[in-house]
Image (cartoon, grey):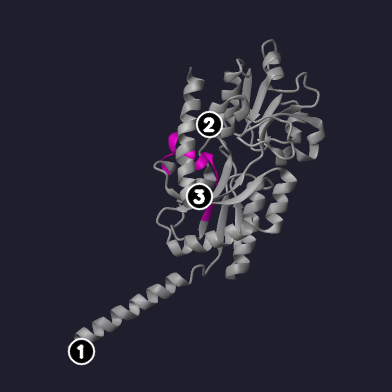
Amino acid sequence: MSKFVKSVTAMALAMAAMTGAAQAEYPEKPVEFVVPWPPGDLEDVLTRMIAEDFSEAYGVPTAVVNKPGGGGGPFPGAIEVTNAPADGYTIGSFLIAIPVVGPQIGIPELNPDPFVPLGNFLTYPFVIATGAGAPYDDMAGLAAHAADNEVALGHFGAPLVPTQVTLGLAKEMGFSYASDAAFDALDCNTLASGDVDVINTTLQLILPCLDDVKVLASIGSERISLTPDTPTVAELAPNLDVALWNGLFVLAGTPQDAQDKIIAVAEKTMMSDRAQALAAETGALVYWQSADEVKAQIATDIETLAGIEALLAE
């Protein structure tokens, strides 16, 4: 073997070793978790737990960045992740709407879906609720009341899953809302202000005033532990059975080593005592669902939502 060939071979081996070392070093700089909603709700709280544990596990700073706005799109938080390199240093904490609805509503950055799931970790205790002074106590009563009275609905965005389910349930029960409006936050103040009559929101946001509201239904297939007597939408209309979940996503092409390290921390965080305590306090389901299971869930949810869209178009 000539000296030149030996030199080239040695250089190639050295570069390969350096590349392997660089890949093995992830993470070597600050990591950002992007939450496309305001601070304070369950996905934000749990993502902050993951970020804290990630920093402790790997010794790098982490930040949780809230990018609210565009409840029905354009999802600026998701777009921020698409504009970052596919290197594992920008991680999206995304509601079902971003991978399921985002590619369908004309947002160029989200069509085709640019993300791959790492795993789901939360099913929201999402509810349809009204004020304690409302002249109805359940969905049947709301339907009867809406026949002769105007009822205004507050939601997080018209294309979003809970809004579509809420409107679909009204259609199945033979009534419609006189008006609806999107809000970045739907909480005790929303109902107290009188801006709307009915809201769909997470139970977490109305826990401080739970004694002053009536929960008419919960969205999903499982009753919420904190409101066990309240029926689910799936009980009232089985064709509307969609769970409202949140998970971690990165851009397609993110190195598998980075994905695996994020997953390892997130799964451990969700099984921690503090995460499970939050679940018990709020009625949320906190768990870890694998990437392959999330892909299957997304496909099922797209099919279910297509049925809801057809129902609303009738």
Residue 242 % position (x, y): 55, 34
User: Could you say which disc has been placed on residue 3 in the image?
Assistant: 1
User: Could you say which disc has been placed on residue 159 in the image?
Assistant: 2
Residue 35 % position (x, y): 59, 49
In the orientation shown, which residue stands out farthest toward the left?
2
Residue at (59% x, 71% y) in the render = 59
Q: Are marks 1 and 2 in contact (CB under 8 Å)?
A: no
**Left or right: 24 with respect to 150?**
left
Q: Residues within 10 Å of mark 3 (few under 14, many from 20)?
A: some
Residue 93 in the magenta stretch? The answer is yes
Q: Residues within 10 Å of mark 1 (few under 14, many from 20)?
A: few
Q: Please say if 59 is above or below 287.
A: below
Element type where label 1 sits in the image = helix
Tag 2 or tag 3, which sits nearer the N-term? 3
Q: Looking at the rendering, which quadrant does residue 184 occupy?
A: top right
Q: Which residues are magenta?
A: 91-109
Three-letter amino acid code of the residue under disc 1: Lys
Three-letter amino acid code of the residue under disc 3: Glu
User: Could you say which disc has been placed on residue 80 in the image?
Assistant: 3
- Residue 189 visible in the snapshot: yes
Residue 145 in the magenta stretch? The answer is no
Element type where label 3 sits in the image = helix
